[in-house]
Amino acid sequence: VSICDICRSYSLLRYKQRSREYERQISQIDTELEKLAPNLKAMQRLADIEGKFDDTTNEFERCREEQRKAQAAFAAVAERRHSRFMETFDVIAEQMDKVYKDLTHDADFPAGGTAYISVDNPEEPYNGGTKYNVQPITKRFREMDQLSGGEKTVAALALLFTIHKVHPSPFFILDEIDAALDSANVQKVCNYTLQHRSECQFIVISLKPEFFEHADALVGIYKDQATNASRVLTWDLSSVEEEND
């Protein structure tokens, strides 16, 4: 073997080694390039996500604006409700004591009793209770549930007549309101109805003569034994008063 052949063999071996090394490096570089290769769909996905984000943001802003409007509308309704409630309540509270005094005063106690009404929650009165208390003449203060039946009846009538002053009605139907009243209180209620008979008509269902004596007309119901049916009797007392005059 000549030196030239040895040199050629060595050169060929070196060439093959370098070729394999170069191929390995090229393969490695290709692998790295593949890892670095951009995803052509990524931009489209990004655009889609940005579009969804913008839509969600706009929807959020729209909902927030609607919430603000709803809150403003609710606040306006709450304010109007509070104003209307308190306007009526203030008138009732102002007139309550006067009406109760008119119902309870007499010759011995011309000032009459005392009544007052208040709300538990002035900020939101419709969400709380209402306190109504009266102090009859010659009596100390007591809670409403500790009053007698007659005292409760007079207190209830005072509240009813006070509300009527705020929202008048053409007539009252009073069904045996005097059941728990003694003669003195029946007469006081009669006097009140007589004083305010020009404001409305009082239709009273009663068995007490005090009401009969001051009525403009009487209506009686009785059972007709012959027909076994109810009959109605009416008597216009205005003509009797004119004859007496």
Image: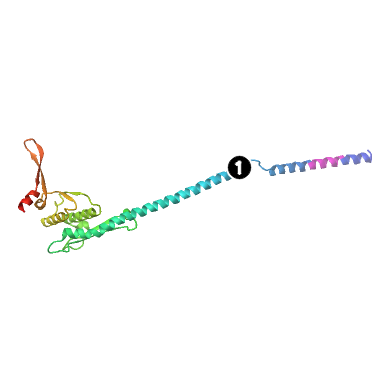
Q: How is the image coloured?
A: rainbow
Q: What residue is drawn where x is 92% and y is 39%?
A: 5
The residue labelled by disc 1 is 45
For badge 1, the amino acid type reads Arg
Asked which quadrant contains residue 156, the reply is bottom left
72 lies left or right of 188: right
| Element marked by disc 1 | helix
* Residue 13 sits in quarter: top right
Q: Position of residue 211 (x, y in %)?
A: 11, 52
- Figure label count: 1
For the view shown, which residue lies furthest in the top direction?
Answer: 227
Q: Residue 228 at what x, y percent from top left?
A: 9, 36
Quarter of the picture holding the C terminus: bottom left
**Residue closest to the eye, 152 or 55:** 55
- Based on the picture, tell me whether residue 19 belongs to the magenta stretch: yes
The magenta stretch is 12-22
Q: Looking at this view, is 13 or 150 the one in front? A: 150
- Give the left or right position of residue 75, taking residue 151 as reference: right
Residue found 5% across the figure and 52% down from its top: 244
When the figure is inspected, residue 43 is found, relative to residue 244, above or below; the finding is above
